[in-house]
Image: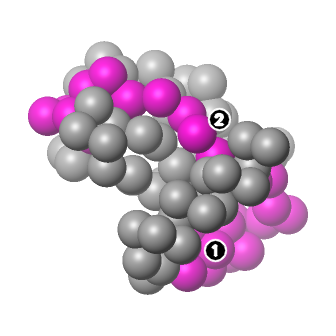
Amino acid sequence: MGHFVYMLRCRDNSLYTGYTTNLEKRLKAHNSGKGAKYTRARRPVSLVFYREVEDRSTGLKLEYKIKRLTKAKKEELVRDFNK
């Protein structure tokens, strides 16, 4: 089973960071209104960054680190990912 940390671009151009074991299913949940409360009012969302990690603990730690970054630093991650 894969473990992923991901970022979504919301309709209002904000970025949402999360952790999942199934990217496709989680993206569908966010876009159907069954994801996080934050993304429900900001649909549609699109996947702009993800990183696979070895286990849940590593994933949650990385998610926490990314959430603490400034918007500019998060945008750098997205830019570098999409090169």
Q: Residues within 10 Å of mark 2 (few under 14, many from 20)?
A: few
Q: Nearer the viewer, residue 32 or 12?
A: 12
Q: Residue 1 in the image: x percent, y percent? A: 81, 43
Whole-angstrom CA distance, mark 2 to mark 1, is: 17 Å
Which residue of the protein is positioned furthest toward the left in this rendering?
41
Q: Is residue 26 within the magenta segment? A: no
Residue 19's place in the image compared with 28, above or below, is below
Q: Is residue 36 left or right of residue 21?
A: left
The mark nearer the N terminus, 2 or 1, is 2
Residue 33's place in the image compared with 57, above or below, is above
Amino acid beneath label 1: Leu
Q: Residue 19 in the image: x percent, y percent? A: 55, 55
Q: Nearer the viewer, residue 83 or 26?
A: 83
Residue 10's place in the image compared with 73, above or below, is above
Residue 48: which quarter of the image?
top right
Residue under circle 1?
A: 62
Give the extent of the magenta segment: 39-66
Q: Is residue 2 left or right of residue 20?
A: right
Say the numbered circle drawn on residue 22.
Answer: 2
Q: Is residue 65 within the magenta segment? A: yes
Q: Is residue 80 left or right of residue 16?
A: right
Q: Residue 56 in the image: x percent, y percent? A: 68, 65
**Judging from the image, what secondary structure is the residue with disc 2 in?**
loop
**Judging from the image, what secondary structure is the residue with disc 1 in?**
helix
